[in-house]
Image (cartoon, rainbow, N blue to C red):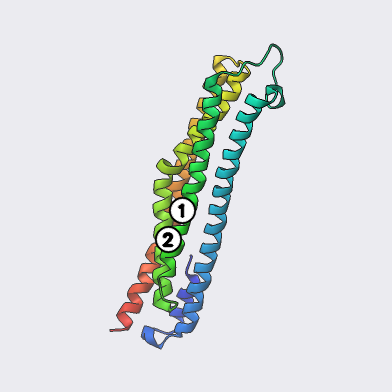
């Protein structure tokens, strides 16, 4: 349970009113949990942003090599000359733009949320509201990332892979295999996001709201 330590504090009061409880100890629990959540989220967003920007650069490098260098540097082919079409370059440039968009989108979303969380007071009630805002952001992100993040990233990845296999003159079954793998992976990520909402974020939000309600009742 996320707030097992809080439950122990409540139980130790022997049904005394909440105001009789050591709010300092409870506040430290909330702060510690919130710090852990913020650290995990910051690392997750840092990875997502880095992947987006790195992949964007990689797509541009591939396109530049195909135009200004030797395609054999990045494409291995058993026989025949590698012919680079305008469509191959367009696919790589489009993939690069999408990856850059993804990285910037994640960066701006994280910056906006950090500014929102800074608006709360550094009190027990303020940190509970800050934690609720943090959890709400994670739920909203998990829901919206499918349309604004995962789908664009998958499209960019598919454009890149299809361009590479086209340069290699791969048969049709390779493209079908790529599409099947991409679809299975996409469904798996979407299911994982929904499970994280149901099994982690929503229970966490209920516990925070329950704690806020107890504090509100005790102040009356």
Asked whether 133 or 83 is in front, the reply is 83
Direction top: furthest residue: 80
Name which quarter of the figure residue 75 lies in: top right
User: For mark 1, does the 10 Å Cα neighbourhood hold few (<14), some (14 to 19), or many (20 or more) residues?
Assistant: few
Q: Position of residue 165 (x, y in %)?
A: 60, 21
Above or below 98: residue 167: above
| Image coordinates for residue 1, horizontal then vertical, percent | 48, 65
The vertical placement of 214 against 39, above or below, is: below
Q: Which mark is residue 146?
A: none
Secondary element at tag 2 = helix
Residue 29 is left or right of residue 214, and the answer is right
What residue does disc 2 label?
A: 135
Q: Is residue 62 visible?
A: yes
Q: Nearer the viewer, residue 204 or 67?
A: 67
Name the image quarter holding residue 128.
Answer: bottom left
| Residue 108 marker | 1
Using residue 162 as the reference point, say whether residue 141 is left or right of it. Answer: left
Which residue corresponds to the image point at 39% horizontal and 47% vertical from the top-left?
A: 144
């Amino acid at each position: 349970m996320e707030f097992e330590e809080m439950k122990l504090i409540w139980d130790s009061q022997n049904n005394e009113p909440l105001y009789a409880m050591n709010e300092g100890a409870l506040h430290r629990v909330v702060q510690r949990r919130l710090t852990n959540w913020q650290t995990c989220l910051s690392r997750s967003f840092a990875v997502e942003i880095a992947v987006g920007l790195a992949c964007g650069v990689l797509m541009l490098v591939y396109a530049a090599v195909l135009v200004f260098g030797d395609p054999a540097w990045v494409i291995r082919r058993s026989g025949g000359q590698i012919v680079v079409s305008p469509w191959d370059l367009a696919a790589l440039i489009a993939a690069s733009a999408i990856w850059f968009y993804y990285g910037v989108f994640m960066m701006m979303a994280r910056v906006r949320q950090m500014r929102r969380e800074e608006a709360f007071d550094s009190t027990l009630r303020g940190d509970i509201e800050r934690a609720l805002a943090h959890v709400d952001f994670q739920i909203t992100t998990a829901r919206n990332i499918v349309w604004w993040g995962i789908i664009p990233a998958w499209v960019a990845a598919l454009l890149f892979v299809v361009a590479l296999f086209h340069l290699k003159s791969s048969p049709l079954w390779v493209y079908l295999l790529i599409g099947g793998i991409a679809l299975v992976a996409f469904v798996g990520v979407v299911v994982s996001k929904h499970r994280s909402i149901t099994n982690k974020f929503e229970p966490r939000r209920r516990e925070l709201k329950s704690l806020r309600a107890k504090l509100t009742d005790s102040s009356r």
